[in-house]
Image: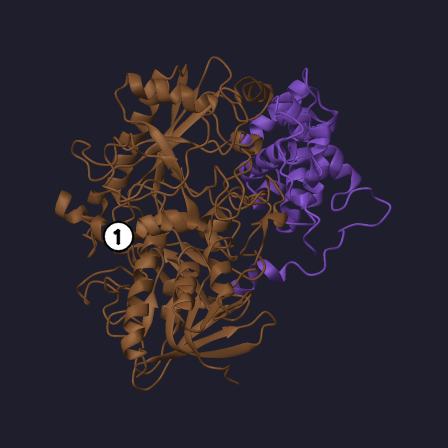
Chain colours: A brown, B purple
Amino acid sequence: MALARVNAVIVGAGAAGGIVAKELAEAGLTVVLLERGKWYTAFDCRKDDLRNQRTSLLGCSFGPDDDRYRRVVVGPDGQERIVAPSEGAYNNNAACVGGGTFSYGAMGWRYLEKDFRMRSTYGAVAGSTLEDWPISYQDLEPYYTKAEWEIGVSGDDTKNIFKGPRSRPLPMPPPPPSREHLILKAAAERLKLHAFDIPMLRNTVQYNGRGACMRCRWCVGFACEVDAKCGTHNTVIPRALKTGNCTLRTECVAKEILTNGQGWVTGVAYFDERGRLQEQPADLVVVSASATETPRLLLNSRSRLFPNGLGNRYDWVGRNLQGHAYSGAYGLMETDTYDDLGPGASIAICDYNHGNPGLVGGAMLCNEFIRLPIQFAMLRPPGVPRWGAAHKDFMRHFFNRCIAVHGPVQEMPVFDSRVQVDPRVVDGWGIPVARLSGARHPQDLEVANYISGKAAAWLKEAGAITTWPKLPGQGLSGGQHQAGTCRMGNDPRASVVNRYCQVHDMANLFVVDGSVHVTNGGFNPALTIMAVAYMASEHIVQTWKGTRMRG
Amino acid sequence: MQVAVVGAAAGPIVSCVGTSNPWRCLIEDEARTLEALVDRIIPADQDPGAAWAGVANFIDRQLVGPYRRLQKTYRQGLTGTNETSAAMFGKRFPALSREQQDEVLRALESGQVSGKSWKQLPAKQFFDLLVSHTMQGFYGDPRHGGNRERVSWKMLRLPFPPVRGRMQDDLTKTS
């Protein structure tokens, strides 16, 4: 039986979905926000180093669970494997209200101007679908600013000479520097690099009615115990609910998007928290389920008119899956550098994002978040045995004397790195699961090598007695930075949505999340996902006022 | 068949053995072998080793929890270790000298072992798993049954008690 009709259904209460819900609800539309996970709060912070979203050895603390979720991953050798969310190959992102923003490290980066014009800057790259965004940095700037002020960003990028112009400074100052920060800052100055304080979606002062970061060591992968990390769960989603126009339904798993005989979207079918199939009719549908789950839902929504799924007339849905080819170096120091001041990551440079000789793109470089003992136990320089007395000695001697510098290498989009739906395997609700296949572009590994060398040089200048590289593998990339699978573009034959995140040829269906990113920058993508969500929401609200989007 | 995987194996979580055994999954004999193994992976020196830290307890506990899919792997691996020990030195693993135990471990690590248990389970695969789980039990949070008295965290000079916020004491919120 169908539920009462609403103006909009949004699938996914993450970085983008939460913002769209708030913008639409405040504009007077009635909204149902569907979220497959639960609504956790700061009280759910367990500080469990073996069970969290970063080190999910004993499971993911904020979902999805290993019992009901699975994916099929096809290796480079063609071997298929069924993987659970706690395994790396699943390429997981949290399933809860706030999505990844509930437990992320909370870097709040703006992409650079060139990141939106990769094709114009570098030309065509063989084996890649590299393209410009249909929007520019300038188009997105007002929405970056809105995200920084509404969600809350601290930091200081005035020393970053590579950044695009900003209309407003960041609302909060950076936290006081840690010991590691000071060491790296001095070294960067000697190397004539332009180091600055990372913009973070984290309160460093009282802001938005919540307190400041208390500098604990459990940050990335964990819930913030004092609610100082800013996500959609503690900013825009409560505001959406406060309007009275938005209903949040948790533990609801979308099955398919419903369409009628005229090709209009009519609502969403989903399984509710008790496993009952429900149909929610709506005037428009926004899919904000992440770059893996969004294409899965579109591809699972097949009908006579759309035999290949929605938005997929030209076979672009699920293509160009990108994450980041993280690359960098570890350095061992002579004296203690660890001072137990979280979150750890605090200083960055953008000197190597572009203009690297002979290479396309690059990466921001920054120091790593705090490495908990179990995380430190999983890395070691070449020559140190991985077990026995020597390994224990290494742990004891260097745990407090190791600095890691790394960065997210911008990946070249590859048409055959993709999300499909598996023809056989289904999840706990009987819905066909995502099937991931493909590999990184060889160029990514070249850039990664180069970036790793730059990281090592920074560490050596900082006094490292030994450095060793951290390099990505050739395998498929997605993970928490997953993007690209429903590309934004002006040409309906070579993209899935237009510049307003509206699916080509479908007036009342929108994709708003990392899926629309044409390229994924050399940065953590959260703030860009948020800015695009604000921009798309504005368009939806304006269009709504004229047409009400009914077929 | 492929569909059934992850959840199906779960069922009600029960111990695999009788109630007189203090271990949850392992039998006494297996547990002794496991303790001896983990204590060579992280041996005692000026700081306690993995056996004292309760790493075998950690592994045993996860084998009826998140690692229940690995019960058979551990059974085969522990049996195989004793077979290899017997083939190399004529005794079961816990009875060997430390030097002999390290030699057996190096044999497992390199995969240069024979014995019928290793036909189904490559020795190297078991060894990789064992090293990884030993690290988790020793350096991970004590709440999971290892890292007794935060022994590894003390060894690493991690400040304790850690910084904690005050939200968990907020009594103005209900439920």
**Looking at the image, which is closer to me, A183 or A329?**
A183
Among the 4 quarters of the image, the one containing residue A188: top left
On the image, numbered disc 1 is attached to which residue?
A: A140
Label 1 is placed on what type of residue?
Leu
Among the 4 quarters of the image, the one containing residue B169: top right
Establish if A80 lies above or below B131: below
The residue drawn where x is 29% and y is 48% is A520
Q: Is residue A483 left or right of residue A214?
A: left
Secondary-structure class at tag 1: helix
Badge 1: few (under 14), some or many (20 or more) residues near its Cα, within 10 Å?
Answer: some
Residue A508 in the image, given as x and y percentages of width and height? 32, 75
Residue A504 in the image, given as x and y percentages of width and height? 24, 70
Residue A436 in the image, given as x and y percentages of width and height? 38, 57
- Please say whether residue A491 is visible from this viewpoint: yes
Residue A435 in the image, given as x and y percentages of width and height? 40, 60
Among the 4 quarters of the image, the one containing residue B75: top right
- Please say whether residue A123 is visible from this viewpoint: no
Q: Is residue A188 left or right of residue B4?
A: left
The residue drawn where x is 36% and y is 53% is A530
